[in-house]
Amino acid sequence: MKPTSQDKTSIDKILELAKQAEIDVTGGKVRRSSSRFCLGVEHGDYNGTELFGVGTDRFIWMAYKPNGTDAMRLFSGNFPDDGVVEFELGAVPEPLSVKDSWARFPYGVDYVLSRAGYKLTKGIDAVIFGNIPGGGMSRSASLTLNLILSLCDANDIVIDEKMKIVDLAQEVENDYIGSPCGKLDQIMILFAREGMGTYYNPKNSSIDYIGLGENASDFRIVGLDTGTVRPGLEKSTYKIRRSECEQFVEILQKADYKINSFADVKDDRLYQKIISQFKDSYPDLCDRLTYIYNAQQRFYQMLDAWKAGDIETVGRIFRVDGIGLRDEYKISGPELETMCDIVRTVPGVFGERMLGGGDKGAAGAVVSADSVDKLKAAVDTAYPVSRPDFADKYAVHICKVVDGIRLYEDVL
């Protein structure tokens, strides 16, 4: 595949950065990894639910080539103050010891691949640049996948089972960085296909691609970056919510409920029995369960609507999910909800809600194509007034559905 105009601009940027950092990537390869947009179920992965989403065209590009040594030399144009990150393969800091540098990601990839028995002997020189918003569209998963695939390529390591790559990427964040993420982000990026929705069933770890129905009205996916800086998941409400869900499952198991996750509560009679028994003693935990229970019911409606090309219903369910995330799961944040409140007033916006781990970062919307300009005008008018601290930091990203991973050769 040929690079897009966006790819070419970013590759030019990488070559400029390479000169500044004095890293030679000429003759190397460029791997592009996407962002993702989850249509359902947000926060469902660690609760055991089925998942559905798409890859979106905000990317991380990494230009790399083997450097003939056993050392890594990497520079990020998004974090230039960190300078060139250099280390010998197999000689990285201990897990959980690096907190505030993007270097924890390449360190973690080296650590996890080595722990899994993959022999790393060939270091790479690499320059990275990305335009994925920080928080909500899976920048960390995109970077981790890109690093794993590129380092494996340089070391002639072939991992045929793509779900193994997902597992390794999750281990980087869980075990090395300390971020308690599930697998939603990695799955939705690694498996993403242009123009298709990705459906994941955890019961058999299967991936299916679902095309949008032929009669769908022309629409756009929009990322609404609030301009806020979201800490890693290990420092956010996400970690608390995940722990609460696991705690409630343990409580229910001790009360002789035969479940392993919230996803196992699909039957209305079972759900009502649990709520009746525990709503007074654990009201917040019951609220979390209520969101997942209702989101699972909506999930199948949303899939049917996608298959039928009924994007208006897809958007409506997206909106209802957002209200549940705000009021039941309690994972949203004030700036996220300001964005949602603004775009909800725009005719042609089918649905909107917060994205990703919560608290801060980006919200998202499903919008009629002819309403995109109106949406942007509404945000540009109202958001700086409502949130003046972020008046020069927010952004509106109009996105397409794209492949999750692409590799370009002969472009440097």
Image: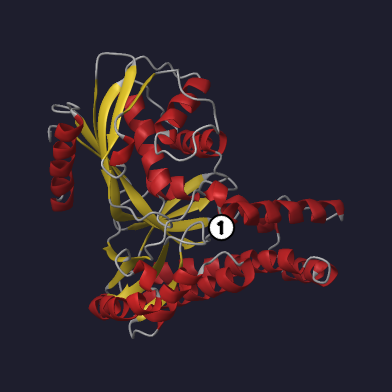
The image's colouring method is secondary structure
Q: Residue at x 38, y 44 (%)?
A: 142
Q: Position of residue 62 (x, y in %)?
A: 26, 37
Q: Is residue 208 left or right of residue 381?
A: right
Q: Residue at x 40, y 67 (%)?
A: 364
Say what amino acid the circle numbered 1 marks. His
Q: Is residue 229 left or right of residue 254?
A: left
Q: Residues within 10 Å of mark 1 (few under 14, many from 20)?
A: many
Examine the image and state in which quarter residue 174 appears: top right
Using the rendered image of the protein, determine whether residue 191 is visible from the camera's viewpoint. Answer: no
Q: Nearer the viewer, residue 217 or 153?
A: 153
- For residue 159, above or below residue 43: above
Q: Check the image and name the residue furthest to the right.
A: 255
Q: Position of residue 111 (x, y in %)?
A: 48, 25
Q: Is residue 410 left or right of residue 180?
A: left
Using the rendered image of the protein, determine whether residue 197 is visible from the camera's viewpoint. Answer: yes
- Say which quadrant the C terminus sits in: top left
Q: Position of residue 78 (x, y in %)?
A: 29, 45
Q: Nearer the viewer, residue 351 or 304?
A: 351
Tell me the SS state at disc 1: loop
- Say which quadrant the N terminus sits in: top left
Q: Is residue 184 left or right of residue 387?
A: right
- For residue 105, above or below residue 299: above
Q: Nearer the viewer, residue 187 or 278?
A: 278
Q: Position of residue 294 (x, y in %)?
A: 62, 70
**How many discs mark residues in the rendered view?**
1
Examine the image and state in which quarter residue 96 appears: top right
- Per the image, the residue denoted by label 1 is 43
